[in-house]
Amino acid sequence: MDELVITGGNRLGGEVRISGAKNSALPILASTILGGGECVITNVPRVVDVLTMGKLLGMLGVSVSHEGNRAVMRADVIHSTEAPYDLVKTMRASVLALGPLVARWGEAKVSLPGGCAIGSRPVNLHLAGLAKLGADISIEHGYITAKAKRLKGARIYCDTPTVTGTENLMMAASLAEGTTVLENAAKEPEIVDLADFLTKRGARIVGAGTDVITIEGVRELQGADHEVIPDRIEAGTYLAAAAMTKGDVTITHCRPAHMEAVLMKLREAGADVQVEKDRVRLTVPGKLKGTDMRTLPFPGFPTDMQAQMVAVMTLAEGTSVVTETVFESRFMHVEELRRMGADIRVEGNRLVVTGRKNLTGAPVMASDLRASAGLIVAGLAAEGVTEVQRVYHLDRGYERIEEKLRALGAVVERRKTAIAPKAR
Ligand code: UD1
């Protein structure tokens, strides 16, 4: 089990290239199940979750060749329609295989993901939507089974906008007979990216990126080439690290339009943020100032940036109130940040963060992907050494993080420890 050892205190400086979005690559790779023909996907980040998706697709019979950031996929035939527990428990996004499998191959058996470190994350809306499309759904022995001869288009209203739920239903509806209307759909850029890819393959989708998506089902999809959009959360994480260390960092190959809420909050916190077409430069001319934040579905402030911004707030003058509205119990980083000297009070789904003059390095334990990112951001600015343990969480979603941080002047080492990682 690896840990990252950070000696804090260096101001970050220079340029960092943003990788492809993990949360876009995952549904796009899963969607290759939907049709035959060659799909060439580029800007695919080499992170553990993406490799896990490749492994799952390979087990199903999809031919997968993933070299560097390019994946070549073919799903002309499928050998299995089952996503087993051992894989799903390491990556909830395996549930993205459900919609495509039942739509194209008439059946799917996918392990229920179970609990995770950021609280209860049900998939009831995925299942209710598939049932509306005519799938026969049952849950037995920890597995979801979905069966349908051919799905039929329907009007589906989601009680709450769900990102992977919208993706699952959009994929399934692409091959359904007739028209599907998804109401109160999630609007994240990753959904638009998936819709763009499916459209290149012959799907008929209108409205992705708004809360009403209309999909006219087609008989089959073909192969297509596609470049994954940049990772807005990775981008935001490097900007948070730059703000926290009062550095001068330019992120490149990013899409500033996908990051408006984060850029606005960084400005409110005292950063100078200069935006160009696909680059953002961040400096901090004066003091960091506390600012209130509320996580929301896109285009609101992303829950996946909450931990990193909380880290920044621990050194910002004044008090910041951070409200988490997307996931319950997404405050696992708080106790660890406190061990570094942060002043944070938890009040229900709110954090009250009072800025301090400094943090001090400590051994800390990562509990989920973004909590780990928050601890890294804190460690970069803390006095002395911070050891972030259980770094496998971070490896699920950040490509070459220590290399990228080192190039910005951070002192970061990866240390191998003997104990095997525990599953999430
Ligand atoms: C996706 C992202 C994750 C991000 C999250 C919110 C991927 C692979 N992961 O996760 O990084 O943190 O969006 O932006 O893209 N809900 C239900 N029933 C459902 C589904 C969801 O009640 O069937 C609730 C969830 O508990 C949560 C909210 O809806 O409160 C939003 O979750 P959702 O958008 O589904 O998150 P994921 O798609 O799992």
Image: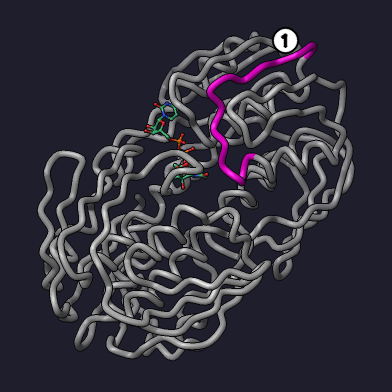
Q: Nearer the viewer, residue 133 or 101?
A: 133
Identified by mark 1, the residue type is Lys
In the rendered image, the vertical position of residue 338 relative to residue 53, given as above or below: below
Which x, y percent locates residue 24?
62, 49
Q: Which residue is mark 1?
A: 152
- In the image shown, does 107 or 173 lie closer to the viewer? 173
In the picture, measured across the screen, residue 257 lies left or right of residue 216, that is left
The quarter of the rendered structure image containing the N terminus is bottom left
Left or right placement of residue 283 versus residue 353 in this view: right
Q: Nearer the viewer, residue 350 or 53?
A: 350
The structure residue drawn at horizontal position 52% and vertical position 42%, both measured from the top left corner, is: 93
Can you give x and y, in whole percent of width and height, for residue 286 in the image? Answer: 30, 81
Identify whether 194 is placed above or below 17.
above
Highlighted range, magenta: 177-191
Q: Is residue 47 magenta?
A: no
Q: Is mark 1 within 8 Å of ligand 1?
A: no
Judge whether 360 appears above or below 185 on screen: below
